[in-house]
């Protein structure tokens, strides 16, 4: 798939996820055959730029190109300035967020709330495209609500303005992450425009990936929550689409090595104190359906030092290696309370940046 001048190694894309798609995670997914990854959303308000988190998001050192940054806001001039600022700091593509359903973002008229104001959406797209000389892409949903779907109209406007590619999450703003994905709406968008269309929503397996491509005719697939704790899903999908054969799960030895490397990069990027705290959700996702995962999570979530977390991870994977050469997923062994905890952590990621972005946009 091509986006502007960039020919991607494949059409599998890491969805931008607040609190998840930091540089270490994007790099890991690219190593595991994601063809492209987009940053966490960055608020357009310039008052956010000097915060530690914002400065960290400007750090693209060593990242595999192309480097894509997603911006969020509701003011065309501010978003245009944010696009210029991020390009000046290394972004090679800019993605506009019109897909986030978090209330505090939407209450500031940003994210998927923009789908309810087509003139403003058009002004934002035009302003950002005019501001930078790199490709600009767009992430949307199917509309504000099931009775007001306008993805086709938004996509037609975006293509006419010069958007290089569009990703469509197959639910409305009102649906958030609940209910069936509207693959037929993504198909309607694909049938309407000529630029690359990327399908997003509930792509949780190689088999589903193939089904979604067939249902939508999309040029690419964007994978978000399914990559949490399973970054190797990209190579699994790539292999299945190419051969029709399923790859086996990673060996325990490989999984341990990948996770420990991820932790090392995570601590180095965020610092130990923040890194230990924010690594907990990743470790929870990695072990969500593995034998003894609930006990492991209780232990690792109490760790306050990186060395302690690493030691707990190593002991846990030593035990798994004694049971099997490869990871064995056992969903039925996950405790009910633990399922609720993991679901809460998974869905909360979309809100991680929402308070800060929402308050800044409303200011």
Image: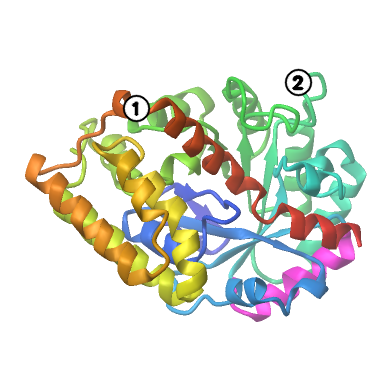
Q: As displayed, is residue 92 above or below residue 74?
A: below
**87 in the magenta segment:** yes
Query: In the rendered image, which quarter contains the C terminus?
Result: bottom right
Tell me if mark 2 has few (under 14), some (14-19) or many (20+) residues whose alpha carbon lies within 10 angstroms of its own: some
Q: Where is residue 237 in the image (x, y as percent from the top left)?
A: 33, 39
Extent of the magenta region: 75-91
Residue in the image at 52% along x and 55% along y: 20
- Relative depth, front residue between 5 and 131: 131
Picture coordinates of residue 168, whole percent (x, y):
63, 38
Q: Distance between the residues labelled 2 and 1?
A: 27 Å
Q: Tell me if residue 174 is in the magenta stretch.
A: no
Q: Where is residue 261 in the image (x, y as percent from the top left)?
A: 30, 66
- Whether residue 355 is situated above or below residue 143 in the rendered picture: below
Instruction: Give the vertical position of 212 relative to 98 (above or below).
Output: above
Q: Which residue is drawn at 79% across and 30% down?
A: 150
- What is the secondary structure assignment of the residue under circle 1? helix
The secondary element bearing badge 2 is classed as loop
Residue at figure coordinates x 35%, y 63% from the top left? 262
Q: Magenta segment, principal secondary structure?
A: helix
Q: Which of 59 and 170 is in front in this view?
A: 59
Expressed as whole percent of the image width and height from the top left, the position of residue 67 reads 53, 68
Q: Describe residue 4's horizontal placement relative to residue 31 as left or right.
A: right
Q: Identify the residue position indicated by label 2 in the image.
A: 146
User: Tag 1 or tag 2, which sits nearer the N-term?
Assistant: 2
Whether residue 55 is visible to the viewer of this picture, yes or no, is yes
Q: In this view, does 231 lie to the left or right of 220?
A: left
What residue sits 44% from the left and 55% below the top?
280
Q: Mark 1 points at which residue?
A: 207
- Residue toward you, 303 or 329: 303
């Amino acid at each position: 798939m091509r986006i502007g001048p960039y020919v991607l190694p494949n059409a599998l894309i890491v969805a931008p996820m607040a609190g998840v798609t930091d540089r270490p995670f994007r790099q890991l997914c690219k190593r595991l055959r994601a063809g492209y990854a987009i940053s966490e959303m960055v608020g357009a308000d310039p008052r956010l730029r000097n915060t530690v988190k914002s400065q960290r998001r400007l750090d693209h050192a060593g990242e595999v190109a192309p480097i894509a940054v997603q911006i969020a806001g509701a003011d065309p001039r501010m978003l245009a300035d944010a696009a210029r600022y991020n390009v000046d700091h290394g972004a090679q593509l800019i993605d506009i967020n019109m897909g986030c359903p978090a209330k505090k973002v939407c209450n500031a008229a940003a994210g998927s709330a923009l789908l309810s104001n087509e003139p403003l959406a058009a002004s934002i797209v035009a302003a950002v495209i005019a501001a930078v000389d790199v490709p600009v892409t767009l992430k949307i949903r199917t509309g504000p609500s099931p009775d007001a779907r306008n993805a086709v109209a938004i996509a037609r406007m975006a293509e006419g303005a010069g958007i290089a590619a569009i990703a469509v999450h197959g639910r409305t703003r009102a649906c958030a992450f609940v209910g069936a994905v509207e693959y037929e709406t993504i198909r309607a968008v694909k049938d309407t425009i000529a630029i690359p269309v990327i399908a997003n929503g509930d792509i949780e397996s190689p088999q589903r990936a193939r089904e979604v491509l067939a249902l939508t005719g999309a040029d690419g697939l964007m994978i978000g929550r399914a990559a949490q704790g399973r970054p190797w899903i990209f190579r699994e999908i790539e292999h299945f689409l190419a051969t029709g054969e399923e790859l086996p799960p990673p060996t325990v030895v490989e999984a341990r090595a990948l996770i420990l490397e991820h932790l090392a990069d995570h601590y180095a990027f965020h610092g130990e104190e923040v890194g230990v705290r924010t690594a907990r959700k990743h470790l929870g996702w990695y072990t969500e359906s593995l034998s003894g995962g609930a006990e492991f999570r209780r232990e690792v979530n109490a760790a306050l030092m990186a060395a302690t977390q690493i030691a707990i991870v190593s002991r846990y994977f030593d035990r798994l290696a004694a049971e099997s050469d490869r990871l064995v997923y056992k969903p039925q062994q996950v405790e009910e309370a633990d399922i609720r905890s993991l679901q809460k952590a998974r869905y909360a990621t979309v809100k991680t940046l929402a308070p800060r972005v929402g308050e800044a946009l409303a200011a």
